[in-house]
Amino acid sequence: MLILAGVVLYILPSVLHGNPPIDDAAATLEYVSDASGWRAAHLVNILAVVLWVIALAFLRTLPGLPGPLSRATGSVWAVAAGVFGVYFGIHAIGLSTAADQYLSGAVDRAAVVERTEALLLVLGSTAFVAQALLGLAVALTGLLLARAETGGRVFGIIGAVIGLGWIVGAVAINFAVIVPFTVLAWAWLTVLGVCLCMNRLPFRAGLPAR
């Protein structure tokens, strides 16, 4: 249920986020001010990744998982959630606060635009690192399931390939590659979540009784 909730809470805010005109700080501020629920949507995005981290903690209790790889996967998920939290936290609080200041007129608009340009530079620097780490986390999760005694090897390999594709897109700084692999990751996690709700892993019979 945590995996499925994370998928839903990741998708909906991502749709609301849209494509801000990041090449123009003033236009970005106006875009953010016009976007209803901007702050809440991005905080929900962070919550989605945190739910995946918690879900993996439960997943790691399944029998037959390789210990070192399991711990490494958990660590990468934790780091990815931290970087993603900073990335979307700046979206949620930094940009929305700047937009409020820009529209209120209480602060010099030129100064607000200058600060926003700095924020956009920081966002640009962290965006692809966050995406690469999420891709790595998905890839390791797939590898973990592929090597598990109770896991589905084919399903795990598919997840690993999807995660690697996400990483390639992030390293290439190309959202045209990141977006399709992100959608595939959502689908893969959804299948995993549904199967776990049925007390089994994909392509496997029921899990051992606990």
Image (cartoon, rainbow, N blue to C red):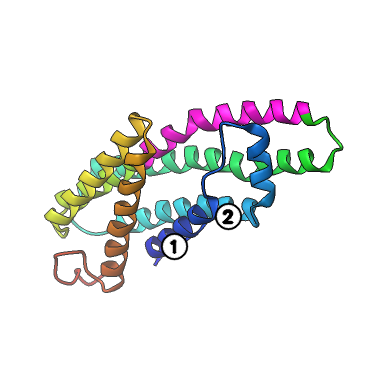
Residue 203 within the segment the image draws in magenta: no
Depicted 59 relative to depicted 114: above or below: below
Disc 1 on helix, strand or loop?
helix
Q: Amino acid at mark 2?
A: Ala
Q: Looking at the picture, how far across and down is residue 39, in whole percent?
A: 64, 51
Prevailing secondary structure class for the magenta stretch in the rendered image: helix
Q: Looking at the picture, how far across and down is residue 8, in whole percent?
A: 44, 62
Disc 2 on helix, strand or loop?
helix
Classify mark 1: residues with Cα within 10 Å, few (<14), some (14-19) or many (20+).
Answer: some
Q: Amino acid at mark 1?
A: Val
Determine the residue positioned at 35% across, 45% down. 74
Determine the residue positioned at 31% across, 43% down. 73
Asked if residue 75 shows in the view, the reply is: no
As drawn, is 170 to the left or to the right of 143?
A: right
User: Which residue carries the number 2 mark?
Assistant: 41
Q: Looking at the picture, how far across and down is residue 5, in whole percent?
A: 43, 64
Q: Looking at the picture, how far across and down is residue 91, in whole percent?
A: 59, 42
- Locate the N terminus and report the quarter of the image it occupies: bottom left
